[in-house]
């Protein structure tokens, strides 16, 4: 028989941090501390949902809500974007305590 323990989100976050070795913890903290509002960075779309895109920005994952897209009213996100697609984003807010990064689509000069 397998015993299962239900973890709430905070417990899962703590467990994940405990599984990182000290070097990984330092690298993660340095990455998060470098994410400041106004920073424009290229990321990779990792997941597409109805309400937005999850974007990997160098090892941290942020949410690009559909209301923060350059054209938020334009159609189905799964038709407009693809997983692993590169996208330029603007860091809007960083919540270290809750482990959340809010992003907005930035205008790509290319």
Image (cartoon, rainbow, N blue to C red):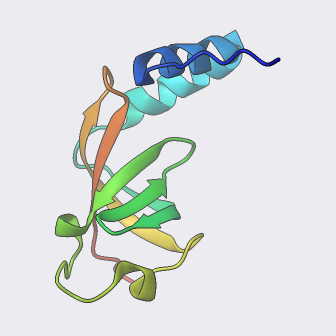
Point out residue 105 in the picture as x, y percentages from the top left corner.
Answer: 28, 67
Point out residue 103 in the picture as x, y percentages from the top left corner.
Answer: 29, 54
State the residue in front, 6 or 80: 6
- Up-down relation of residue 109 to residue 65 (above or below): below
In the orientation shown, which residue stands out farthest toward the right?
1
- Up-down relation of residue 106 to residue 40 (above or below): below
Q: Is 77 left or right of 22, judged from the image as shown?
A: left
Q: Is 76 left or right of 86, judged from the image as shown?
A: left
> What residue is rendered at 27% in x and 89% in y?
75
> What residue is rendered at 51% in x and 19% in y?
7
- Up-down relation of residue 98 to residue 49 (above or below): above
Point out residue 94 in the picture as x, y percentages from the top left corner.
Answer: 28, 35
- Up-down relation of residue 107 to residue 43 (above or below): below
Position of the C terminus, as image quadrant, is bottom left
Q: Is 80 left or right of 28, judged from the image as shown?
A: left
Which quadrant holds residue 20?
Answer: top right
How many dots with numbers?
A: 0
> What residue is rendered at 31% in x and 59% in y?
64
Position of the N terminus, as image quadrant, is top right
> What residue is rendered at 32% in x and 25% in y?
98
Point out residue 92 in the picture as x, y percentages from the top left corner.
Answer: 22, 48
């Amino acid at each position: 028989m397998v015993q299962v323990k239900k973890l709430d989100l905070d417990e899962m976050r703590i467990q994940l941090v405990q599984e990182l070795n000290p070097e990984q913890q330092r690298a993660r903290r340095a990455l998060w501390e470098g994410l400041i509002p106004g920073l424009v960075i290229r990321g990779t779309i990792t997941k597409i949902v109805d309400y937005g895109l999850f974007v990997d920005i160098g090892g941290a994952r942020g949410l690009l809500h559909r209301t923060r897209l350059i054209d938020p009213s334009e159609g189905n996100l799964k038709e407009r974007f693809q997983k692993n697609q590169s996208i330029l984003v603007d860091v809007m807010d960083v919540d270290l305590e809750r482990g959340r990064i809010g992003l907005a689509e930035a205008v790509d000069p290319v």
